[in-house]
Image: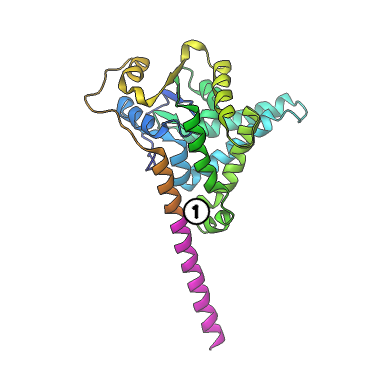
Amino acid sequence: MGQAPSVPKPGKTIQVIGAGLPRTGTASFSRALEILLDGPIFHGGTQATLGPPAQIKTWMAALRLWDLTTDPDSKPDKEKDEYNKKAMLNLISTQLDGYAASTDAPGAQFTPELMELYPNAKVICTVRGIEGWEKSMNQIMHYTFLWFLRGLLLPLPGMRHFISYLTLLNVQWTRLYGEKVPTRLTYERHVEWLKSVVPEEKLVFFDVKQGWGPLCEALDVEVPDQPFPHINDGEAIDGVARFHIRRGLIRWGVILGVGVGVLGCVLYR
């Protein structure tokens, strides 16, 4: 989890809404939930970058509809807004069908919508030290600012949409938190936002460093007879980034090689 995409399991439904921001131990949290809930977990970052191409495109469609239904500058249109919201909820529901929980972005930013779809689910926000979180987020931003990334990923199904996906996600974050680039204020505002949209009795804050105890108590399940999983999010993200950059280079090498070969055949006929 956090390193390989999960496959939905028929009959499973969302029992936990992971409302924690990326880089708050969401990979370890996802693996722990997979054990406790005995089902696949939809870790947003992993599914977007390593899952089927349809998943990143579905989230993009949902983010566009979210933008339409929450745009403060647009004229109110109750009928149209209700139609767009219904379409957005349908996309999200279809996306998460067969999963026991959702974690990471963009699910964390869709917490109100997920509560509407899964009213019996527990909302758990993973937390960590703000300074460490800010430093980790800067690591992600490093990759998104690589000037050649969009062109490099173009031959890769799914990942060719990654920069556009991040742009849509940034629109949502900017509207929710008031900042285009994540900082410690983003973290603080996310926590305050959750407290304003989630009933107090349904919201749990959890640090993966605490281990099984608090999480099992929140879910009312027994503590497993195995160590709490600890996955390094930073190493996982670095690994995924290198994997896709390498794939892009290889794919472009093949494309250029074939192109040169075809051109040579045409010129020397």
Asked if residue 13 is among those painted magenta in the image, a careful observer would answer no
Q: Position of residue 154 (x, y in %)?
A: 55, 57
Q: Which residues are magenta?
A: 245-269
- Indicate how the structure is coloured in the image: rainbow
Q: Position of residue 258 (x, y in %)?
A: 49, 73
In-image side of 265 versus 25 (left or right):
right
Residue at point 45%, 49% (across, down): 241
Furthest-left residue in this view: 225
Q: Position of residue 245 (x, y in %)?
A: 47, 56
Q: Is residue 137 visible?
A: yes
Q: Is residue 121 visible?
A: no
Q: Height in image: 7 above or below 199?
A: below
The quarter holding residue 184 reads: top right
Residue at point 66%, 26% (across, down): 82
Task: In this rendered view, identify the residue nearer to me: 133 or 196.
Answer: 133
Q: Which residue is mark 1?
A: 157
